[in-house]
Amino acid sequence: MVRPKVFVTRRLLPPYLEVLREACDVEVYPGEGPPSRMELMEKVKGLDGLLCLLTDKIDGELMDAAPKLVVVSTMSVGYEHVDVPEATKRGIYVTYTPGVLTEATADFAWTLLMTAARRITEADRFIRARQWKIGWIPTFMLGSGVYGKTLGIIGIGRIGAALALRAKGFGMRCLYYDIFKPPSEREKELGVEYRPLDQLLKEADFVSIHVALTKETYHMIGEKELRLMKPTAYLINTARGAVLDEKALAKALKEKWITAAGIDVFEKEPIDPENPLLELDNVVLAPHIASATMEARSKMAEVAAKNVVAVLKGEMPPFLVNPDVLKVRPLDKARRV
């Protein structure tokens, strides 16, 4: 049997290559950045599997250029860059990598929360600019305490739940909003209380966003929602940039509707040089690195590779986005190994 062909759109951490090479002929895009649209359209011709990132747009046009394609594996939790209905219609299995980056992302959300609350990046810039002239001033660079405050979590999935468990160690009162309420036993385990979104925003000292980007969540936090927050409150976003209206956030920070924010994701990535957030001191900005630990990124790549190999072997992949694809192309028909 001819070995199936798989293209990987970026160099990743091991052991993904060993996993793929067990069953496939593998080509890895050599550039540090993503392949261009034209390059990707050319590369997918004749492919059986594609391992991509959230920076790669996988739409119907691309799928039409790859008539042999049976699996698209994205190394991410989000899959809004993949046209899932179009893939399902063509019998293409779409897989993703949930779970393995939960702890890293929750850690980073907590890092942003603490950094914003205690003004760490401001303090760092202040020292590096050689502006520290007086040893200790009682009223200088005052931030906010975190212990015992109220944390509002928007989205109580894997990452939101992991953040709630971290907040327990700081004696925080935890509120959450989600369209899917977990069982009362799970609420008790996490130490969280449900609130409608508007009420959560009014009560919380810190608000952290952990929802997927969908049509329903696009700009779910905008001017109206930001005006509901306390003027002493902080907003953290490690979910997806478009969940938050960045222009409204910049206005809120500039006009002090809220005290500060910590942002890891943006509507346009890399961030637009004209983005008004870049001019503000009361926001901590990071370049989409919430999952950027050696452990998490290595495991993500491994799981993404295992998803590809499973489908090509005619086996159920560990994490399938579109189970309806089984009706269009059963696993035995997807088998290439």
Image: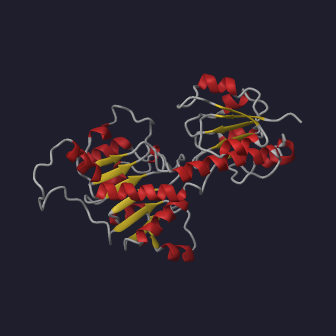
What residue is shown at x 20% (from left), y 41% (from top)? 129
User: Looking at the picture, how far across and down is residue 244, in whole percent?
Assistant: 41, 47
**Residue 99 position in % (x across, y down):** 59, 57
Residue 320 visible:
yes
Viewer-nearest residue: 268 or 1 = 1
Position of residue 113 in the picture relative to residue 296 (left or right): left
Q: Which residue corresponds to the image point at 56% horizontal and 40% vertical from the top-left?
A: 54
Quarter of the image containing the C terminus? top right
Q: Residue at x 62, y 51 (%)?
A: 97
Residue at the image position 87 percent from the left and 46 percent from the top: 332
State left or right for residue 298 relative to residue 45.
Answer: left
Residue 3, position in %: x, y? 82, 35
Please say whether residue 228 is visible from this viewpoint. no
Nearest to the observer: residue 238 or residue 247: 238
Horizontal arrangement in the rendering, residue 79 relative to residue 176 (left or right): right
Image quarter of the N terminus: top right
Residue 249 placed where, x, y %?
Answer: 33, 46
> In this rendering, is residue 231 above or below 33?
below
Q: Quadrant of residue 79?
A: top right
Q: Quadrant of residue 235?
A: bottom left
- The image shows a total of numbered marks equal to 0
Q: Is residue 104 above or below residue 65?
A: below
Check the image and tell me how it is coloured. Answer: secondary structure
Left or right relative to 147: residue 310: right
